[in-house]
Each structure stands twice: as C-alpha cells, then as structure tokens.
Amino acid sequence: MSVRIAVTGFNAVGAVVFTLALTAFGVLLSGMQVDPVAQGGTGYLDFVLFFNAVLFLSPLAVVLVFLGVRVRRGEHWAWLASLVFWVFVGTMMPLLAWVLGAPLPFRLVPVLCAVALLALLLTPQARGHCAEPDEA
C-alpha cells in the first residue's frame, strides 16, 4: 500500500511540476513586462520562470513519472534513485529558496513533500517490494 501511495505522490508531483513548466514557458513566450529587480524585488520570479521552463522542470516531470512506474514494478535501482532524489530535493530546495530570498512556502512545501515520500519509501513494505531478488 505504501508503494502505491508513494507512486501516486510521484505522479502528482510530476503533474504539478509539468503544469508549472508549461505556465512558466507560456509567460516567457508572452513577453512579460515585469521587472522585479527594478521594482525593489529579488529577481526570484525571473530566475524561477527561466529555470522552470527551459532547463529543469519538464525533464524532471518525466523522470518523476518514470521512477514512479519503475518503483511500482519493484525495481531496486529505481527505489535507490528515488531515495537519492528526494534527499537531494529535501536539502537543496530550501537552501536555494533561502539564497534567492523566496517566501516561506517555497522553502517548506518541497521539504514536506520530500519527507513524506521518503517516509513512504522507507517503510518495510516498500523495501520488501523493491528488494533485489537475492535479498527477498
């Protein structure tokens, strides 16, 4: 059961990430006239839109769904890769948000999602589901 919930979480996060990427890409294509730095802001919006649309979020969404499918099939390497991925997200996203001066929800939400999915992946049922054949 915990594996199914974790995979559903992977797919949900992947769908949100892909939606954000499409939104950011649309804003970039529309010729946005907002300049947060000139208006006393941090430039966080410009960075997030570029980073989301062009470099990171579209491939990330695909990787999340791919890992979710592989974890559901019980592949050990996907389980390990998922653990590494969520530890990375849980540590790097709040640091990046802090350096860029992002609001508190941008610091907390990725960490809470990462902790919840890590907890699901570390349950004995999930470890047993994704164990290597010689460990089972």
Image: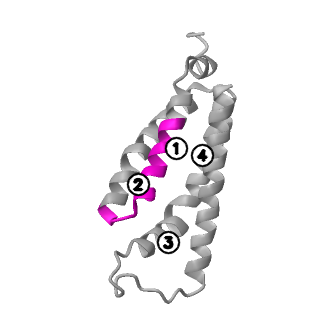
* Residue carrying label 1: 113
Residue drawn at point x = 60 percent, y = 49 percent: 13
Which residue type does callout 4 highlight? Leu
Q: Considering the numbered disc 4 on the image, is that residue within a helix, a strand or a loop?
A: helix
* Residue carrying label 2: 107
* Residue carrying label 3: 49
Nearer the camera: disc 3 or disc 1: 1
In three-dimensional space, the C-alpha distance between marks 2 and 4, rounded to whole angstroms, equals 20 Å
Which residue type does callout 3 highlight? Leu
Query: Is 42 drawn above or below residue 129 in the view shown?
Result: below
* Residue carrying label 4: 64
- Magenta region, residue range: 99-116
Q: Earlier along the polypeptide chain: callout 2 or callout 4?
A: 4
Residue drawn at point x = 36 percent, y = 86 percent: 39
Q: Earlier along the polypeptide chain: callout 4 or callout 3?
A: 3
Residue drawn at point x = 60 percent, y = 16 percent: 128
Q: Residues within 10 Å of mark 4 (few under 14, many from 20)?
A: many
Which residue type does callout 2 highlight? Arg
